[in-house]
Image (tube, helix red, strand yellow):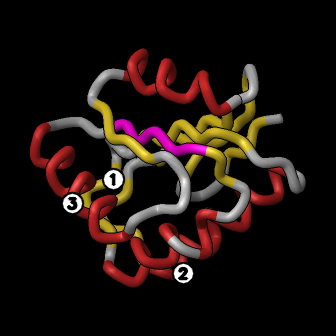
Amino acid sequence: MIVDGTYAKMWISDGILFFVYKEIYEINRSMAKEIVSQRLQLQNENSYPIFCDLRAVTNAQKEARDYLAIEGAYMTKALALLVKDDHSMAITQLFIKTSSPAYPTRVFRDKNKALLFLQDYK
């Protein structure tokens, strides 16, 4: 099953939940809540490692980032974030460091490396 929501497209394949954001200038808390709700419906009470492609997102408000890191972490075994450039990499790594997620989380610029990281958490 593929969920093609307003803000992201998501599906489960080979034990990994794929999550690809659509082009968004800035994610706010309301958007974050909708995104998490759709993801949890797709997961149907099953935990998965998550591949999250952030390359089309320009920014996220602090309230949205906090929501995604805390409430949005439910049913997540591990998280691989795919970003488009070094600037996005630095910002995302700083956010991970300050939010201290309760599950393994890494940032990548290479999709294959991100998927390899998630293999151990299937």
Q: Position of residue 55 (x, y in %)?
A: 32, 41
Seen from this angle, which residue lies furthest left? 87
Real-space Cα separation, disc 1 to disc 2, in angstroms: 16 Å
Q: Are marks 1 and 2 in contact (CB under 8 Å)?
A: no
Residue with the mark numbered 1: 57
On the rendered image, what quadrant is the N terminus found in?
top right
Magenta stretch holds residue 116? no
Residue in front for this viewpoint, 108 or 101:
101
Please tell me whether mark 3 or mark 2 is closer to you in this view.
3
Please tell me whether mark 1 or mark 3 is closer to you in this view.
3
Label count reads 3
Secondary element at tag 3: helix
Bounds of the magenta segment: 78-82
- Classified by dominant secondary structure, the portion drawn in magenta counts as strand
Q: Are marks 1 and 3 in contact (CB under 8 Å)?
A: no
Where, by quadrant of the figure, is residue 82 drawn?
Answer: top left
Secondary element at tag 2: helix
Residue with the mark numbered 2: 30
Q: Residue at x 73, y 56 (%)?
A: 75
1 or 2: tag closer to the N-terminus: 2
Amino acid type for the residue under numbered disc 1: Val
Q: Residue at x 20, y 44 (%)?
A: 89
Amino acid type for the residue under numbered disc 3: Leu
- Label for residue 94? 3
Q: Position of residue 108 (x, y in %)?
A: 31, 33
Q: Are marks 3 and 2 in contact (CB under 8 Å)?
A: no
